[in-house]
Amino acid sequence: MAVNRLWIRQGTVVTGEGLLAADVFVRDATITAVLRRDGPGAGASSPELDDFQGAETIDATGLWILPGGVDAHVHFGMPVRPGVRSLGWRESSTCALLGGTTTVVDFANPERGESLRAAVERWRRAAQADCLCDYGLHVTVPDARPERLAELPGLVADGCATFKAFLAYKGRLMLAPTELATLAAAVRDAGGRLLVHAEDGEAIAQAEAQHIHTGRTGPEWFPASRPPTTEVRAVETVLEIAARTRCPMTLVHLSVAQSVDRVRMFRQGRDAPAGLVAAETCLHHVFRSATLYRSGRDDALRAICSPPLRSPADGVALMAGLADGTLDQLASDHCEFPLAVKRHEGLHGFPMVPNGTGGVGERLIVAYTLGVKKGGLSPAHWVRVCCERPAELAGLGHRKGRVEAGRDADLVLFDPAAEGTRLPIGPGDPLARLWSGTDWRGAVRQVLRRGVAVVRPGVRWTEPEQGEFLPRRYVG
Ligand code: URP
Ligand code: ZN
Ligand code: ZN
C-alpha cells in the first residue's frame, strides 16, 4: 500500500498547555513527529526532515493546528418513543466533522429486558453502518440487579469502560441512591468509570405532576419543573457516594454555579483522591440561558433539554469552572430533534417534549467565539476542555486529543482571525438549533480524520469511509 506522507508547515500547534510554532508530520493515519521551529528543541535534526522531502505539504501560515475535537457526550439516532428519534448517526457525525470534531462517545441504552451487551451490539451495528467520525460507547445501566452488574467486567474488557447512571427520569432509568452506590462499587471493581446524570428525579416527578394538575404545561414551565436545587442535591448525593465507594465518577452536564462549588470543595477535601470525580458541562449551559423559555413558544421548545438552561450568572460560573479546571470537559450533549417534532409532542404538554438540543458541529466555534474571544478562556483551556481532557477521561488519551507523535492524525487547521462564520453547521433542522447567524469568530479550514481530508480549502466536504469503533481502556 502506498505510504501517504503529509508535512504541515509553518502552523501553530495548540495544546492544553499553550501555543507552539511547530511543523507536523503525518504518515498514513498517524502523526509521526511535531518539530518545533522555536523554543526548546527547535532546529534539532530529525529523520522526518529527510524522509518528508517531496511529501505533500500544507502551508499552515497564520493557522492553528488543533487536535480533532473529542465530544464525549452525544446521542446520535437515539430512539425516544415510536416515531421519535434524535438526528441520526450519518447526519450528526457529518455535523461533527464539518465543525472539527473527529471523535464522539455516544451511549448504548438498553431497552426493557435487554442485556447491556445486547444493547452495545445493537448500538454498534447502527454506528457501524452510518457513523463517519470515530466513536466509542458509554453504556447506560438502568438498574443495579446482580445480573446487570455481572456484565460489567466483560464490557470493560471489550472497550466499553464507562457507564452512565441516572438519578433522574423516574419510572424509566432512575436509580435510588442505594442502587447508585451498589452500581458504583461494581464499576470500581470492574475497573471502569461511572458517569452520573445528577438531577433529583423524585422531586422532578412531583413538580411535573403539580404542573400537570394545575394546567401549567406549556414549554415555558419546563425549567420550573427542574429547579437548580434538584441538581445541587443530586450532586451532593453523588459526591458522597464517590467518597464512600472510591468509584471514579464523572458528573455530566452540570448547569448550576453551586454544583461547580460543590465539586471544587469536594476536591479540596480529605475524601477526594486526585482524579476520583471529574465534571462536565455543556455548550448550551455555559453560553445560553433560561431567558429563552420566556421569549416565545419555539424558543422555549428548542431549549427543552435536561438539565434546563439556567441564569446568565450560572453561565459565568461554569466558564470560570472550565478555566480553573474544576470542570474537566465541555460537551455538546448533542441530541437534536426537529422543531416540528418538539412542536407536535409539545401539544401534549412539556413532559412529552423529547429532551435535547444540537451542537456537536457548533461546539468548537461557539466556545472559541464566546469563550476565547469574548470570555475568560485561553486557547489552551479551549483545547484542553474540548479535546484533551475528554479524550483522557474516556480512556482514549493514547490515540486522541493531542497533536503529538504516535497519536491518530485527527487534525484541524483553524483560522483564529476569521470573522463572520455562519452557524448552524451541517445537516439537520436549522430551526432546532440554539446557534444561528453569522456573527461567529474563527473558522475550520481543514479537517483530517486519521490522515484523510474531509474538509479542505475549496472542497467543503468529502465524505470519508465509516468511522472506527474505539475500544477504550479507562486508565484513571
Ligand atoms: O436533554 C438531554 N440531555 N437529553 C439527552 C439525555 C441525557 O440525559 O443526557
Ligand atoms: Zn443525562
Ligand atoms: Zn446526554
Image (spheres, grey):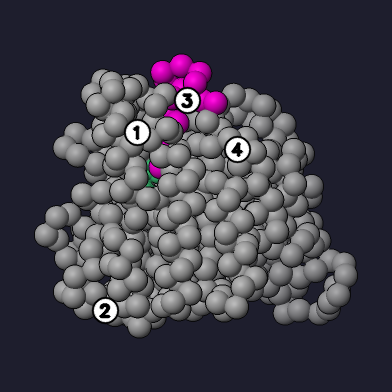
Q: Nearer the viewer, mark 4 or mark 3?
A: 3
Q: Is residue 410 left or right of residue 140?
A: right
Say which element carries label 3: helix
Task: Provide the secondary structure element on which disc 2 rests.
Answer: helix
Q: Nearer the viewer, mark 3 or mark 2?
A: 3
Who comes first in sequence, dot 1 or dot 3?
3
Q: Amino acid at mark 3?
A: Tyr
Left or right: where 16 falls relative to 203: right
Q: Which residues are magenta?
A: 291-306
Q: Could you say which disc has been placed on residue 337 in the image? A: 1
Residue identified by numbered label 4: 287
Some atom of ligand 1 lies within 8 Å of the CB belonging to the residue at label 1: no
Magenta-colored stretch includes residue 292: yes
Q: Is residue 323 magenta?
A: no
> Looking at the picture, does residue 223 appear above or below residue 327?
above
Q: Which residue is mark 2?
A: 154
Whether tag 1 and tag 2 are in contact, CB under 8 A, the answer is: no
Instruction: State the separation of the CA atoms marked 1 and 2.
Output: 33 Å
Kindly tell me whether mark 2's CB lies below 8 Å from ligand 3: no
Considering only order in the chain, which callout, 2 or 1, is on the residue closer to the N terminus? Answer: 2
The residue to which callout 3 is attached is 293
Whether residue 228 is visible, yes or no, is yes
Query: In the image, what residue occupies the spot 26% across and 79% down?
Result: 154
Quarter where residue 110 is shown: bottom left
Above or below, comparing residue 342 to residue 366 in the picture: above
Task: Please state which of residues 299 and 133 is positioned toward the viewer in this rendering.
Answer: 299
C-alpha separation, residue under disc 1 versus residue under disc 3:
17 Å
